[in-house]
Image (tube, rainbow, N blue to C red):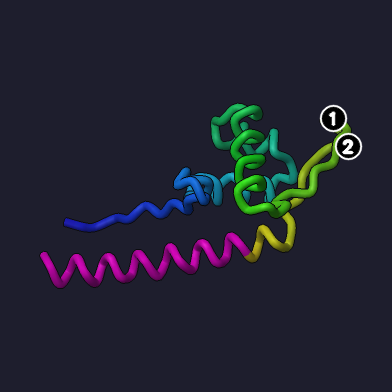
Amino acid sequence: MQVRVKLSLLDGRGAPFMGAGLVWLLRRVEKLGSIRLAAKDMGMSYAKAHRILKGLERATGQKFLLRRRGGHERGGAQVTPYARRFIARYEKLEHRIGAYAREAFADIF
């Protein structure tokens, strides 16, 4: 047996706005330079990816992406320095919670 913990961050109303899937999406945008390509790579529609990313920015009041309009040839997106720091902190929290959960699981089971 093992334990696995899923971490979600909630906004002031208690609605989730950040989880592992969003981190994956941001990492794909960072690698591919495009929301459209990142969404396609994850098997997600562009509209859904855009909506999730806008929700993240709304919940935090911060820009996570610098977007460039221009279509397939000139458009794209870049992850902001703030987003990189936020992702690092989220992953640190996720790691710490996971370590605690594994330790507690071993003690209890």
Residue 108 appears in the rendering: yes
Name the residue rendered at 66%, 35% in the picture: 50
Residue 61 magenta-drawn? no
Magenta region, residue range = 86-109
**Residue position marked by numbered label 1 in the rendering:** 71
Q: Which mark is residue 44?
A: none
Measuring from the top left, give residue 41's x and y in whole percent. Answer: 60, 36
Looking at the rendered structure, the kind of residue marked 1 is Gly
Report whether 97 appears left or right of 2.
Answer: right
Helix or strand or loop: what does disc 2 sit on? helix
Helix or strand or loop: what does disc 1 sit on? helix
Locate residue 81: give its quadrant: bottom right
Rendered position, 64 above or below 50: below
**Residue position marked by numbered label 2 in the rendering:** 74
Residue 28 appears in the rendering: no
Report whether 94 appears left or right of 100.
Answer: right
Q: Nearer the viewer, residue 2 or 80?
A: 80
Residue contact between numbered discs 1 and 2, judged by CB atoms under 8 Å: yes
Rendered position, 33 above or below 7: above
Looking at the rendered structure, the kind of residue marked 2 is Arg
Q: Residues within 10 Å of mark 1 (few under 14, many from 20)?
A: few
- The quarter of the rendered structure image containing the C terminus is bottom left
Name the residue rendered at 16%, 56% in the picture: 1
| Main SS, magenta residues | helix
Measuring from the top left, give residue 39's x and y in whole percent. Answer: 62, 35
Residue 93 magenta-drawn? yes
Rendered position, 93 above or below 43: below
Name the residue rendered at 41%, 54% in the picture: 7
The CA distance from mark 1 to mark 2 is 6 Å
Count of marks overlaid on the render: 2
